[in-house]
């Protein structure tokens, strides 16, 4: 069968299951199987596929029709122009997190720093910052051993083993040297809202990466309290927050002697990241 016909079969099957991104998903899945870019696949859509690709494609489309995220089917997600290995044990990197990376780089571009990424998951923040801040060092910690393994694979893939360290530890028990920057995209969904998440997220992404406790601020508050021990004077704290957490998170920061230096808005103009510096 030729790729064009197969793409149509996949797309129609996903459309039948009301998946809005049916065409795109079908293309990404097939491009991954035949190991070409999506653009290349579409340019040259008269190629015959092997029986093996045909079978794998049907299997993958079935998984997608059961709402498994595309990134978990193809085991990768692009973040800051790099493909990161992801799976069922790590959060799929999100575009709003790239906005936080961008804001951090505006401050630190060209500087050499030592930073900490709390809840590193796939390592997308840790490794994207290290790629840009050439002589800097970064430590990623995560409570999930499986996430740490995924992060280690990404470190190897990007050959950043000389500058990246990882540790499987609960942030509460983490003590180390002081850092110039602490960054975190913590789990921030309030527990009562977990049931309202789309099934694509609720049934497939790790709860430990989503559940932020009663008000969603559990880890955010711990990070803010503990910066006393871990952040250098004039160091920067950057945290990603949920759409309606700015008021509470900023109050916590101010109460703990932070001056807010930047608020980063997402594409819908919600404040999704706060950057602060310790004033005393
Ligand atoms: C929202 S995910 C972020 C993953 C990744 N940094 C990203 O932006 O895609 C939050 C991560 O925090 C980790 N985590 C949750 N509680 C933690 C804790 N107490 N100490 C360390 N890591 C924790 C989770 O396992 C998860 O990998």
Image (cartoon, grey):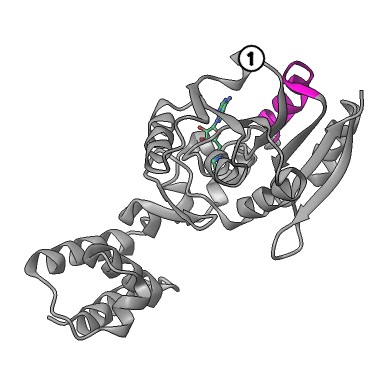
Whether residue 256 sits left or right of residue 183 in the image: it is: right
Whether residue 199 sits left or right of residue 254 in the image: it is: left
Residue at the location (90% across, 33% down)? 254
Residue at the location (60% across, 47% down)? 132
Inspect this view and state whether residue 278 appears.
Answer: yes
Tell me the chief SS of the magenta region. Answer: helix
Relative to 167, residue 63 above or below: below
Relative to 103, residue 122 above or below: above
Relative to 61, residue 146 above or below: above
Label 1 CB sits under 8 Å from any ligand 1 atom? no
User: Is residue 224 on the magenta stretch?
Assistant: yes
x then y, percent, for residue 114: 66, 28
Residue at the location (32% across, 56% down)? 74
Whether residue 185 sits left or right of residue 145 in the image: it is: right
User: Is residue 165 on the magenta stretch?
Assistant: no
Inspect this view and state whether residue 245 appears.
Answer: no
Name the residue tied to disc 1.
Answer: 176
| Among the 4 quarters of the image, the one containing residue 73 | bottom left
Whether residue 121 sits left or right of residue 214 in the image: it is: left
Question: Around disc 1, counting alpha carbons within 10 Å, would you say few (fewer than 14), some (14 to 19), or many (20 or more)?
Answer: few
Q: Could you say which is closer to the camera, residue 204 or residue 276?
A: 276
Q: In the image, which residues are magenta?
A: 217-232
């Amino acid at each position: 069968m030729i790729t064009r016909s197969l793409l149509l079969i996949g797309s129609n099957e996903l459309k039948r299951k009301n998946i809005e991104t049916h065409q795109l998903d079908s293309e990404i899945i097939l491009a991954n199987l035949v190991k070409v870019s999506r653009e290349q696949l579409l340019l040259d859509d008269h190629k015959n596929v092997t029986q093996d690709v045909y079978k794998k494609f049907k299997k993958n489309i079935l998984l997608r029709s059961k709402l498994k995220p595309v990134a978990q089917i193809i085991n990768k997600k692009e973040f800051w122009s790099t493909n990161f290995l992801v799976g069922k044990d790590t959060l799929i990197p999100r575009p709003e997190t790239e906005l936080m990376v961008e804001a951090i780089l505006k401050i630190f571009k060209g500087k050499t720093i030592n930073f900490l990424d709390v809840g590193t998951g796939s390592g997308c923040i840790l490794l994207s910052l290290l790629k840009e801040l050439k002589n800097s060092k970064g430590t990623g910690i995560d409570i999930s051993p499986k996430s740490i393994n995924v992060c280690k694979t990404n470190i190897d893939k990007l050959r950043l083993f000389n500058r990246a360290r990882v540790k499987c530890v609960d942030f509460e028990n983490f003590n180390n040297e002081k850092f110039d920057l602490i960054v975190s995209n913590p789990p921030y969904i309030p527990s009562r809202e977990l049931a309202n998440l789309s099934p694509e997220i609720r049934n497939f992404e790790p709860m430990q990466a989503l559940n932020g406790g009663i008000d969603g601020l559990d880890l955010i508050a711990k990070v803010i309290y503990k910066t006393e021990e871990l952040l250098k004077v004039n160091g920067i704290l950057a945290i990603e927050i949920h759409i309606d957490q700015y008021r509470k998170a900023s109050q916590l920061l101010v109460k703990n002697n932070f001056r807010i230096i930047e608020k980063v808005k997402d594409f819908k103009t919600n404040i999704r990241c706060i950057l602060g510096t310790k004033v005393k």
